[in-house]
Image (cartoon, rainbow, N blue to C red):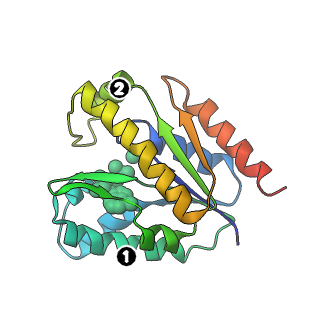
């Protein structure tokens, strides 16, 4: 069994940028973008057209897509699978876990990585990302969400027994963050 890294972080921390660089920097790595997998099923079932519509569905519908994505990831057998996903989703029904027990158990992570940035960096990234329909939230709620992410992370680590790493993705730090993660993962197979 290869390595399976689950990378999480609230929207706008620069998670996808870091994940893509980790995949590019590790030979034989495979990207699993959880939102993209959910979107593919959602589009084929005519439930949504855009990834930012997923979180607007009822939780019941999101859960079906979530389980389908998790079982596709569970079947990947690459040397390193890097999962780009979320610890929780801000839905109309409340904060909903992105990694409930059955989902995280199916994916069998060997490592958990939380990407963080400051509330100012997150707001700036959300405002300039024109490819997305990001929720605009106050600096206070970003601070709350960052704290919430750490508590969801400890729950996932406890459920899976996988070690957790918290990385700070400050402005212009993406390459450094990605290479430190690649180095850590190379060390894990020595
Ligand atoms: P992203 O591009 O990473 O922001 O993901 C797009 C969307 O996919 C998110 O806004 C969520 O609606 C959904 N998504 C991603 N990961 C999960 C997950 N683990 N559980 C439920 N929904 C998820
Ligand atoms: Mg992303």
Q: What kind of element bears circle 2?
A: helix
- Residue nearest the observer in this picture, 162 or 137: 162
Q: Residue at x 21, y 76 (%)?
A: 45
Q: Residue at x 52, y 69 (%)?
A: 107
141 left or right, relative to 9:
left
Q: Is residue 163 above or below residue 57?
A: above
Q: Quadrant of ligand 1?
A: bottom left
Residue carrying label 2: 119
On the image, which quarter does residue 9 sit in? top left
Q: Quadrant of the C terminus?
A: bottom right
Q: What kind of element bears circle 1?
A: helix
Q: Is residue 130 visible?
A: yes
Q: Residue at x 27, y 25 (%)?
A: 139
182 left or right, relative to 95:
right
* Other residues around mark 1 within 10 Å, as few (<14) / some (14–19) / many (≥20): some
59 left or right, relative to 144:
left
Could you tell me residue 90's position as x and y percent?
24, 50
Label 1 to label 2, Cα distance in Å? 32 Å
On the image, which quarter does residue 98 sit in? bottom left
Mark 1 or 2, nearer chain start: 1
- Residue nearest the observer in this picture, 161 or 187: 161
Q: Quadrant of the N terminus?
A: bottom right
Could you tell me residue 62's position as x and y percent?
25, 67
* Other residues around mark 2 within 10 Å, as few (<14) / some (14–19) / many (≥20): many
Could you tell me residue 49's position as x and y percent?
19, 61
Could you tell me residue 21's position as x and y percent?
58, 43
| Mark 1 or 2: the one toward you | 2
Q: Is residue 9 visible?
A: no
Residue carrying label 1: 68
Q: Residue at x 46, y 75 (%)?
A: 72
């Amino acid at each position: 069994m290869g390595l399976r890294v689950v990378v999480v972080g609230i929207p706008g921390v620069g998670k996808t940028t870091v994940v893509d660089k980790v995949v590019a920097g590790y030979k034989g790595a495979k990207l699993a973008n959880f939102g993209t997998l959910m979107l593919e099923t959602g589009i084929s079932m005519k439930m949504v057209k855009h990834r930012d519509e997923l979180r607007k569905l009822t939780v019941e519908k999101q859960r079906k897509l979530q389980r389908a994505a998790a079982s596709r990831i569970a079947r990947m057998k690459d040397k390193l699978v890097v999962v780009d996903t979320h610890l929780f989703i801000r839905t109309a029904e409340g904060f909903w876990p992105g990694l409930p027990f059955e989902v995280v158990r199916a994916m069998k992570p060997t490592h958990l990585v939380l990407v963080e940035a400051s509330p100012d960096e997150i707001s700036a990234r959300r405002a300039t990302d024109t490819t997305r329909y990001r929720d605009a939230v106050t600096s206070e709620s970003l601070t709350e969400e960052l704290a919430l992410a750490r508590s969801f992370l400890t729950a996932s680590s406890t459920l899976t027994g996988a070690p957790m790493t918290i990385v700070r993705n400050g402005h212009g730090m993406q390459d450094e963050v990605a290479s430190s993660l690649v180095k850590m993962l190379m060390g894990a197979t020595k």
